[in-house]
Image (spheres, rainbow, N blue to C red):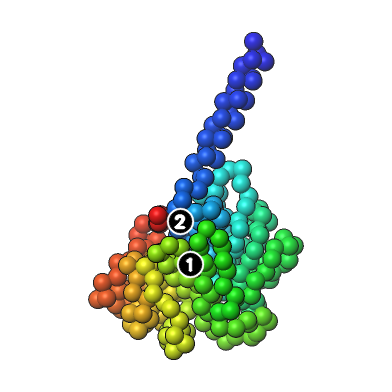
Amino acid sequence: MKSRLIAFVLILAAFLLLLHEWAFLPAGTLKVVMLDVDQGDSILITTPGNQRILVDGGPNLEALERLGEELPFMSRRIDLLILSHPDSDHVTAFPQILERYDIKTILMTGVQHGSSRYKAFLDAAHAEGAEIILASSNNDLDLGHDLLLDVLWPLEEMLNEKVKHPNNMSVVVKLIWKEHEILLTGDIEKEVEEALLAFGADLQSDILKVAHHGSRTSSSTGFLLAAKPDLALMSVGRENQFGHPHPEIIKRYETLGIPIRRTDEEGRIEIVLE
């Protein structure tokens, strides 16, 4: 009798586990989740083909915890890891994420940076053995299922380059699927926004990730007019020490009729596109 009860419990547990995993199967949609990681960036994208793209790793280890809430319990797969730039508010959780998850490909600039977290990330990336792709406008990624990752910035590979302003070496990509275009901007500032305009980059998008947490150094009027997003997503910490987002920037979005959803107001933000 006892053995039958144990067998029943095991079968029930397996069924519930399969049911849980089934809930995470792709449904022909593109899901974008801006994780709530305080004053930093971390975005998880699940494609119609069930590929997982993680953009940035936040300023602390919360991104690791949030991933555990988003992904199936038994799964340890991330297909593409994108590091926009090496500043601590974007890279901090990546060493632990590389240890816990199986990472297939990493997209990054490879610029020099002196932080210990960035060094730990590089060490973990090499230990993982993931394919590393250096970001440049010549290295677009065809992800299949009619989904393209268009790399807009930097224009050329920057491996081991010394840079004065890491923000302006942020990887800028546009994810294109069907009629949907999602523009991810890292922490680029006005100078790069103007450079992208000068080079004739196609910035038009229906969803825009607000650059640099709503700092007044970014979101220039010309850039926003070129992007013409229907919605802007902003990752920003509650009552952060930088005063982000700047009231001038919020007013600019309002004037241009671009609604903003913010993690400091909503926490986790999920967008599902069909």
Residue 243 visible (yes or no): no
Residue 138, image x, y percentages: 58, 79
Which residue is at 55% across, 79% downward? 137
What is the C-alpha distance between the residues marked 1 and 2?
10 Å
Does residue 222 appear to the left or right of 188 in the view shown?
left
Identify the residue at image location x=68%, y=81%.
160
Tag 2: residue type?
Leu
Q: Are marks 1 and 2 in contact (CB under 8 Å)?
A: yes
Q: Secondary structure at mark 1?
A: strand
Q: Quadrant of the N terminus?
A: top right
* In this view, 161 is above or below 69: below
What numbered label is drawn on residue 166? none
Q: In the displayed structure, does residue 259 sit left or right of residue 235?
A: left
Disc 2 is placed on an element classified as strand
Residue 259 percent location from the top left of the image: 30, 67
Q: Of callouts 1 and 2, which one flags the residue occurring earlier in the amino acid sequence?
A: 2
Q: Identify which residue, 216 or 180, lies in the foreground.
A: 180
Label 2 crowding class (10 Å Cα cut-off): few <14, some 14-19, many 20+?
many
